[in-house]
Amino acid sequence: MSETKMKVQMPSDAAFILNKLNEGGHEAYIVGGCVRDSILGRIPQDWDITTSALPEETKTFFDHTFDTGIQHGTITVVLHKENYEVTTYRVDGEYADCRHPDEVSFTKNLTEDLLRRDFTMNAIAYHPNEGFRDPFHGQEDIAAEIIRGVGDPPKRFQEDALRMLRCVRFAAQLGFAIEPETWAALCANTALIQKISVERIREELEKLWLSPYKEKMSLLWESGLLAQIDPILSARLIGRSQTILDEISACPKDALLRWAVVLQDYTPDEAKNFLKGMKFDNHTLKRVCLLLEQLKNDVPTEAYPLRKLAGTIGEDAMKELLTLQSILRPDSPHEESKALFEKILTDGDCLTLKTMELSGKDLMAMGAPHGKVLGEVLAELLDMVLQVPETNKKEILSDKALSLLKEKGLI
Ligand code: ATP
Ligand code: MG
């Protein structure tokens, strides 16, 4: 089947939206990522619609809508709990800040709307009755596996610098080559990335690290983009480019773990500063720093220190640490640690006070005073249990507690 005759299987609700708008006398197409992904045989994440109807007009056709970015012409239509973004054909004005157009104006011309989009593969519209509307030959570029800027590439990156990161990310997601003029324009405009918010940069980088085509990831530093985002990270990755790419792709598809791989040469303090600067959430920040700190040493291969460490950092962090160690330090005895940790989990060994058979309350019932010493006694009891898991029995712990309390003159 030739590309132009191919049919896109869209959800019936998307077809319903197109139909409603058409019945009201408006043009409407599915557009962008969903059309690109359908052509590629990938499952689209969301189905965006572009229409000649104005936002206020669009709203009249559907029972449940809400304003998403009404100033940019986007409203969301909700059907069967799914959201569909419906955007009015639009022409973007000047971009003084390299990210947001100063003004947008609506148009009745589909080609003008497609012209404002970033890459030819993302500038294809589709309607079940009309087939593809593809004035910039996006289908040919998809078939040739090429990412090409729509129109004048330097201008497009200057308008919105985020497109440079999208370009590299799409290359790594799809395994496509970047067309030479588009690549030259990207390399010439990397400094503009500094105008983009760290949150947007972080989201794109994260998508990049999770992409399947590792050999394309290095375009991030080969283009000079990463040096503009973080010169230290760029220098470190350039220094060991191939190894780092192998390590990233050997890592499970988990953003946090892949960030830890990327930042592996950072001291925990350096990593903290980097992650803070990129406005990471607290959990990621703490966990990545913890993993980097722990990676300095081998994970123990003996039961007592391994239980102790697992109790301190937690079961999930322990699993992540073992995964990272196997990737980043393959010569370490990670297999032994892993097998031992699995046994510890299967045996259900007590690792923390939470699962110890004697609690602070029990100690107070035995006459122990409230306060710091109580904590010390509990810690000693836990240490005994960590050394000999079989001692996690109420009678044994009570006996030991009594003698400890007496020893300390507390009862
Ligand atoms: P994905 O959702 O897989 O990241 P996508 O292409 O669907 O990829 P979205 O951010 O969902 O990306 O955007 C939908 C469409 O909007 C794109 O396909 C493109 O046509 C257009 N678009 C998105 N961001 C930009 C941008 N920065 N500049 C120009 N057009 C854009
Ligand atoms: Mg999308």
Image (spheres, grey):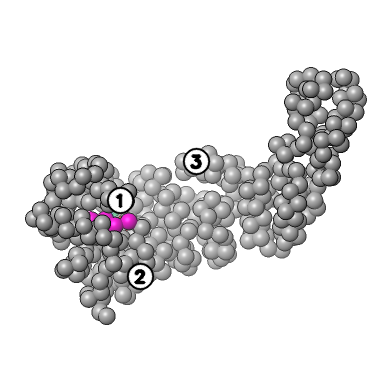
For the point 28% across and 63% down, the residue is: 10
Residue, disc 3: 281
Q: Which mark is residue 41?
A: 2
Q: Residues within 10 Å of mark 2 (few under 14, many from 20)?
A: few
Asked whether the beta carbons under mark 1 and mark 3 sit within 8 Å of each other, the answer is: no
| Quadrant in the rendering for residue 27 | bottom left
Residue 66 location (% of width, % of height): 25, 42
Which numbered dot is residue 80?
1
The reply to whether dot 2 and dot 1 touch (C-beta < 8 Å) is: no
At label 2, the amino acid type is Gly
Q: Secondary structure at mark 3?
A: loop
Q: Determine whether 237 is above or below 349 in the image.
A: below
Q: Nearer the viewer, residue 58 or 258?
A: 58
Distance from disc 2 to disc 3, alpha carbons, whole Å, reads 34 Å
Q: Residue at x 16, y 68 (%)?
A: 129
Disc 3 marks which amino acid?
Asp
Using the numbered discs, state the Cα–Cα distance from disc 1 to disc 3 in whole angstroms: 32 Å
Assign ligand 1 to one image quadrant. Answer: bottom left
Question: Residue 283 vs residue 166: left or right?
Answer: right
CA gap, disc 2 to disc 1? 25 Å
Decide whether the magenta segment is chiefly helix, strand or loop.
strand
